Amino acid sequence: MIRGILAVGLIGMAMAEKPNVLFVACDDMNDWVGFLGGHPDTVTPNMDRLAKRGIVFERAYCASPICGPSRAAVLTGLKPETSGVYHNAGTYIDYVPDAVSLPRFFRDSGYHVMGCGKINHAMGCVVQENYDEFGPDAGAIGGPFTWEELNMNPGKPVERDDIAGRSDGLKSGIVKNVYPGKVIERGNLRASLPLNGIDNGIDRPANGYNTFDWGPVSVGDEEMPDGKMANWGVEKLKEQHDQPFFLAIGFYRPHQPWYAPEKYFKPFEGRQLAVPPTVGRDLQDCGEAAKQYAHYPWSGSFSTVRKHRQWQEAIRGYLASIHFVDAQLGKLLDALDASPYADNTIVVLWSDHGWELGEKEHWGKHSPWEGSMRVPLVIVPPKNSGVKAGRSKGFASLLDLYPTLADLCGFPIPEGLDGELSLIHI
């Protein structure tokens, strides 16, 4: 449903003139961004300046409100009911091994394809055939802690590789191996987990790792996985490329746990933040299955947040995580603007799904409601395309990214995709 109108003037170009693609994903980011007006206290100057340059799709939706199937849909251009990917187990190649992914399509079409972080959803796996180069990973749930430090089973040895199969080799430095109340002292990092004081085992006893948590951490951007990704992306934009490139940056924030460097919490300290709109007995007209689904602690529960009087602090953590990832995006945009590729690069900003912080008594994603399904989506055409910035109020699907990018770059749209080009005119 995203319009092929953006491809005007690009079809038929020689490979040397093909536009580059900067493909930036955020994780679990709802409409709490300035250009969508989803939260009055949000701080997203870099996303907002990007939005002013391109097409903002005000009513963009994911194919599924869960990481695995949503990202599989983006990468394959196939709906979950076509691919069979309905959950986070495995990766898309386990279900549709013959599918040519979006990055593989560009690689097969003569592009130099680079990626880092969370593009596909999988822990301990990257589909190597998709990339010429793959950079830093999302680490242990996107934060400065190691898998061992986040483990909630005292005395249990933990060894996890990154998604490219590389071990970070970090020692945990655990002083007190008890959870909750686990003390971490390593380099500049000083923390007692969980930062929010809520025992993660209450809501997610089978999870094994602390994820239902939020709070500032005493590290710099470069010590966070997203900071490492941004720096890697900046270096790639500084390099000389003799062929068009497709650069995919998969930021992990604002995925829970909401750990971010202290400075990103500062704008939200010392004041009452707006809470999401909630309606008393909002589930009254829903069936029992829907009520149970809303209350199930997929990512923690809203009732636990309220019981521990953490609603304001959780909102602060989510906003700080968005502010943090916005700053990382800003580094990429600055590097692109200073590069020889500034005029001939398509920039895409998207999120795999939204996140609910109390709406319909729900905490997290997984739901079929607006908060989980609606996502930020911006496409900035090359400056030399002549396409003007604007806003589309029509429906758009993340499924349409694959065919739209193929069309924008002057390639025939592959057959068999479920996504389609919209006829909506900007």
Image: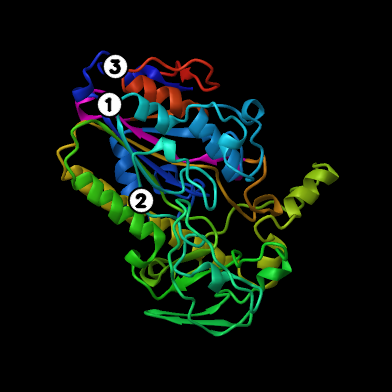
Image: magenta residue range: 370-389
Q: Which residue is at 59% across, 29% downward?
A: 96
Q: Are marks 1 and 3 in contact (CB under 8 Å)?
A: no
- Compared with 188, 6 (above or below) is above
Residue 8, quarter of picture:
top left
**Residue 210 as seen in the image, left or right of residue 411:** right
Marks 1 and 2, the one that precedes in the sequence = 2
Residue 84, quarter of picture:
top right
Residue 367, horizontal then vertical, whole percent: 67, 44
Task: Determine the CA span between mark 1 and mark 2.
Answer: 33 Å
Marker count (numbered)? 3
Q: Do the residues labelled 1 and 2 touch (CB within 8 Å)?
A: no
- Mark 1 highlights which residue? 388
Callout 1: SS: loop
Tag nearer the camera, 2 or 3: 2
- Compared with 239, 60 (above or below) is above
Residue 172 visible in rendering:
yes
Residue 221, horizontal then vertical, whole percent: 34, 65
| Residue lying at the far bottom of the rendered structure | 175
Tag nearer the camera, 1 or 3: 3
- Disc number at residue 8? 3
Q: Which residue is at 47% across, 45% downward?
A: 126
